[in-house]
Amino acid sequence: MRTARVTLLIAAAMLAAAELVSVSLFLRDFSDQQSNRLRTAVEQAASLLPRVAEWVRGQAPGASSAPLSPIDPFDRLTLEDPQSPLLTEELRARLEKGELVAMAFVSEREVSVLGLVHTTAGAKVFRLTETASQDPRLATYQILIAQHTFILLSALVGFLLVGFAPRSFPPESPPVARAYEEAMSRLRLRDDERRAAFERERSALNSILRDREAMARAGELTAGIVHEVRNSLGAIAAQARLIDVAGGERVRPGVSAITEEVRTLQSVMARFLDFIRNEEVRFEEFDLGRMVSRVAAREGANHAVRVSVEGLETRVAGDEDLLERSIENVIRNACQAAGASGEVWVKFGADATQAFVIVDDNGPGIENVERALRPFESSRAGGLGLGLPLALKILSLHHGTLDLSRRPEGGTQTFCRWPKMDPAATTGNARGVSQPPSPDPNTAEPHS
């Protein structure tokens, strides 16, 4: 009996120690994430400092805030009240040294970066505020910390009960001990399941974050490169025209080749700019059938494939120019995948809330959906890998989705949809969304 008591005491002590370590690790990980968030906010604010300083110096006395666009990822830029309780002597000293100070406000899910700009009217303190969306990891951390804390308390209670229990167990003690062990076992099993789910979710979120960070860096780099290259291309084209005028027929073939290559590079640069540009969506009502038919006719004439269109004429809301570019990229991708002897089928329409365009092709079929939607990922020789990502970007701006899937009979189906009238009906392209249902064929009629 004494051996059993010692064993239970050791087990309870080990369990309490393990849970104490687990709670400490989760709290430290959460603290590290908050520190990384503050450090990232300071770095982003530092990159905007010249524009912020120019804005601050341009404010009239007594002004408190004004828009500065774009200031992504910050939501607001304001002048701080000199009498604000936040501006302690220590904080003022740090700001006077030229530091940018970040502070997190958990209740409002806000991160603010304070800085100081010297103006002719004296030193002014500005605040850049970023309102973060609800982080699903925060709720997961809270659940795990609460669960581990409960297990820790249970282990301590068990340790005290066993340690101060009478030497000889009464008849009902062994069943109580077994029940305690079973309860601890179930809690540990549930904890393992939650931990595994948390690790899967964290891995997926980290992957999304890496993709977004890479896209942000690529966008900044591409914008600078495109600007310089376009200037050089303009100079090359101008020199080619001068050579053509001066050289006559003898140099005309070479000049034509140079001009054609310049035109190709300018087209590539335009596609890069289309992808990295911050588009402004203007929601207006338009005829979906007319737009889809126009795009299908244009792409069918540019590719040696048969493109057929069917659907019900309907009026939907959205930015027609942007959506036309999105659907154009989807149909062009299908035509290129189908090949010279292939076919492409385009269906369109709308239900009570959603407008949709479905594009099917009988090409080789898509192999990796996530890879196909990543920028600069292309399985076609010479492809830039920007067609489908640009289409997804435009649909996401309309609060819509783009889903890719393999057709059972071969080829790929691309399902585009967005709110028919209410732009807030969905939340964009979400991972893990099940295959969207195909429209009822009985409701679709050939479009004339």
Image: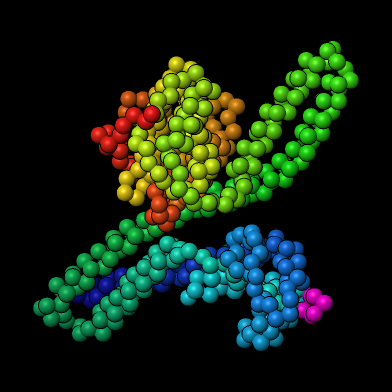
- In the image, is residue 111 above or below residue 391? below
**Left-right relation of 149 to 294:** left
- Residue 297 x, y percent position in the rendering: 48, 27
Q: Position of residue 179 (x, y in %)?
A: 18, 70
Would you say 366 lies left or right of 104 here? left
The answer to which of 441 and 383 lies nearer the viewer is 441
- Look at the picture and state if 202 lies above or below 157: above
Quadrant into which the N terminus falls: bottom left
Residues drawn in magenta: 118-123
| Residue 147 point in image, percent of width and height | 34, 70
Quadrant hosting residue 338: top left
Q: Taking the image as drawn, is residue 208 in sight? A: no
Identify the residue at image location x=20%, y=83%: 167
Asked if residue 267 lies left or right of residue 242, the reply is: left
In magenta stretch: residue 119: yes
Q: Residue at x 53, y 75 (%)?
A: 105
As displayed, is residue 258 above or below residue 227?
above
Q: Is residue 225 visible?
A: yes
